[in-house]
Amino acid sequence: MTYYNLALFALALGGLYCWRELQASKLREGALLERLDKLSKEKRTLPAVPGHLNPHFLFNALNTIRYFVRTNPASARGLLLDLSLVLQSALRKDGQVSLRDELESGRGYLRLEGARLGPRLEIVDTISESDLDQLIETHILSHLLESLVKGVAERPNGGVIHLDFRNRRLILEADGHASLPSEVVKTLGPNLQIAREETTRFEWSLEQT
Amino acid sequence: MKILITDDESPAREELEFMLKQQLPTAEIQQACDGTEALRRLDEEQFDIVFLDIQMPGLDGLEVATKLLEQQNPPRIVFATASSEHAVEAFRLSALDYIVKPIAEDRLQQTIERLQEDSDQRDGFEKLLWSRRERKLWAEASEDRWVLLDFSDIQYIQAQDKKVYAATDGYPLLRVRRTLKELEQEMGPQGFLRVHKGYLVNLRKVKEMSAWFSGSYTLILDSAKKTEVPLSRRFVSKFREATGW
């Protein structure tokens, strides 16, 4: 009798434990699903900026390189490398990449535009080579630079583009009026500050990653 | 041939100039680095062709073309740009051609051929204008001698066996290398009237008229030879109208 009672008790205890575990796991699953749902919603409000290549830029760059092939082959070779950096960057998957990599293709882009626009485009680049391992969203930098170059090129006498990186903030400033695609503005949200006067100034504060 | 290249990018200007020089070694080529400079240059001197980039600071290529078309004798316009998005608008501005950079040699050659055809046509047009203004006409006195006739010296123009002749008082019939139709258009405003399938008469020279048969007449001109020109029935009413008969 005692054994029988004991066995029954143990069984009941075991059942109770299993039920609790089941409930708990259900709860955990629910929480997980909820979190996933929240994450995906967050993702929907932060659209990725797709890689892009302005065809006008591409054909103008090819035309410029063609001129240098004839007049200055060494420059032409350099510009072809710059073009391949720009293409690599445009073909990068959406996501994150090191500031160093994005800056390398961004500088290539600026050299190509500099070759095309001549003395009308001046670049002042004071970004030091340290502290560039930080990850940033892909394609954003190319959008920022493209809009600044456009703003400068619209001015008959051209202008200067400044590049700086201080206190985890990438600071880009140029003469002229530069406008950004809305998806870039949306993606960076409060991390991008825009100031427009005689110049256009973008301050992109890079989040801790 | 005088050519103006308009582009805000120096490599693009230089490259186009290099290619044009290869195909047109005798052409005089100048460069303008934006739309405003192009208009100033075109205002100062006459160019045959202007190559226009579209995206430029200040006045863009389409605006330059629009302003050029308001002028009396605009140069021919060729757009040279990195994208084809403005092609329709460019042709609405009566551009002669629209080429996309980078420009291939044979594509530029097509443009040049198009330019040459167009300038032949313009030359023909200018010839027409000159003779209309000066009221003169070249005629052949013999195989190697030509006479520049004043319209007022011509009594009539005659077409015969697909050849055209001018009749004057001082010369025998002189061959004219033009068609009767062309001459009718050109000399009509100067008092010449078609009076017969094969005759254009200088109305100032008509002196007398006599009935011929079935509604046609003979015109007798004021000349020593009393030259006669037929007036066919088909043209009688026009002749009546013109002479107040």
Image: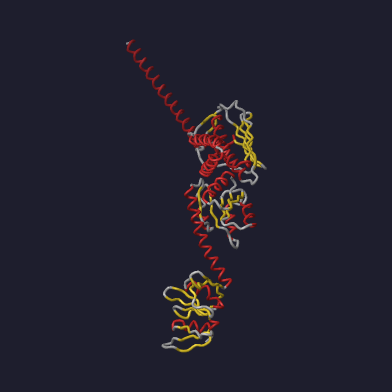
Between A37 and A115, the residue placed more toward the observer is A115
The single residue placed furthest to the top in the displayed view is A2
Position of residue B96 relative to residue A207, above or below, is: below
- The residue at 49%/59% (across/down) is B117
Between B7 and B177, the residue placed more toward the observer is B177
Between A55 and A169, the residue placed more toward the observer is A55
Instruction: Place residue A168 in its image quadrant.
Output: top right
Left or right: A167, with B79 as reference point? right
Residue A35: percent from left, percent from top: 48, 30
Position of residue B185 relative to residue B106, above or below, is: below
Residue A125: percent from left, percent from top: 63, 33
- The residue at 60%/63% (across/down) is B72
Position of residue A171 relative to residue B223, above or below, is: above
The single residue placed furthest to the right in the displayed view is A198
Q: Quadrant of the N terminus of chain A?
A: top left
Residue B110: percent from left, percent from top: 48, 53
Q: Quadrant of the C terminus of chain A?
A: top right
Left or right: A117, with A90 as reference point? right
Q: Is residue A42 visible?
A: no
Position of residue B32 relative to residue B240, above or below, is: above
Left or right: B186, with B32 as reference point? left
Looking at the picture, the colour scheme in use is: secondary structure
Between B172 and A163, the residue placed more toward the observer is B172
Q: Is residue B155 visible?
A: yes
Residue B158: percent from left, percent from top: 47, 77
